[in-house]
Amino acid sequence: MEFVRSLECEFLKIKGSYIIWVSVFGGLFFSMFWTLRFLFIGNHMNRWTEAGAWDRILDQNARPFVGFLIPIGVILICLLITQIEYKNNNWKQVHTTPQKYSTIFLSKFTILFLLAILVFLLLYIGILLHGIIPCLVLDGSFPKHPIPYGYLFLETVKCFILTLPIIGFQYLLSLHYKNFMVAFGVGLTVYVGSMPGIKLGIIGNLSPYSFVLNYFDLVIEPYHYWLAIIYFVLLFILSYVLYLNKREKG
């Protein structure tokens, strides 16, 4: 019950904030862009005769979403969640409430995790709409290519898994650094620095951003998903240990 009450409090804190709107806009950004572009140029899936039409739709949405939008989006969402306390100097008040530190840590992380799930659900919905809406508007019918709901959902879940190390890393930074710009700068520097490191084969899978960048470059392998999960678990444990042992929590 303590965790449920703490979770309810966290929901109230983000209610009416920019966090939810950032998540919704981020999840639908590329699908809205491509849908509007298709409508503008008169393109739709029913004009395509080649096989793999839905793979093309998936590729247009998921690759730039995972490779570019998600890293920046996760940085911002993590910072916005923790800055609620830093901005109002509420950390000390939070820690004087009859809650365990573990409950506070997990409730905030749960909010972050649920927002991430929301973003990827919207990505999935956006992929479907990107394929369906231009056909309805321009051709007056549903896509002639069968809609692979299960396949698209599975691919969306895979993208989510590759994002987990970023979530763990940025949550750690956001809790550790009080200054907004420090946490943002560290996350952005690691992300940007990972790009040439991966291209040159220097960092391998050491960076939490390496998995999404490999996905963008179409060099993802099945074992990358397991590595991403392990990476996330290790970062989550490290973040929890650092939070418990931090001398000044806020």
Image (cartoon, grey):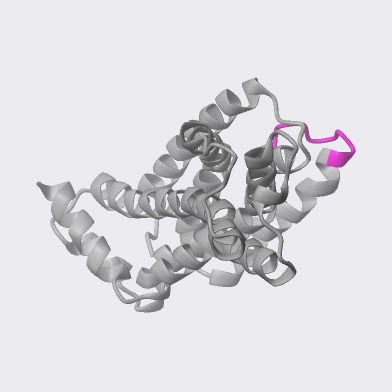
Horizontal relation, residue 174 to residue 223: left or right? left
The image shows residue 173 at horizontal and vertical percentages of: 53, 54
Q: Residue furthest top?
A: 223
Horizontal relation, residue 243 to residue 201: left or right? left
Q: Residue furthest right?
A: 200
Residue 82 is covered by the magenta coloring: no
Which segment did they paint magenta?
Answer: 199-207
Horizontal relation, residue 8 to residue 88: left or right? left
Horizontal relation, residue 29 to residue 153: left or right? right
Q: Residue furthest front?
A: 140
The image shows residue 212 at horizontal and vertical percentages of: 66, 42
Residue drawn 54% across and 36% down? 146
| Residue 235 appears in the figure | yes
The image shows residue 119 at horizontal and vertical percentages of: 46, 54
Residue drawn 43% across and 35% down? 237
The image shows residue 169 at horizontal and vertical percentages of: 55, 47
Relative to residue 201, is residue 81 depicted above or below? below
| Depth check, front residue: 70 or 185 | 70
| Depth check, front residue: 186 or 188 | 188
| Residue 208 appears in the figure | no
Residue 203 is covered by the magenta coloring: yes
For the stretch drawn in magenta, the main secondary structure is loop
| Depth check, front residue: 205 or 121 | 121
Residue drawn 40% across and 42% down? 240
| Depth check, front residue: 241 or 223 | 223
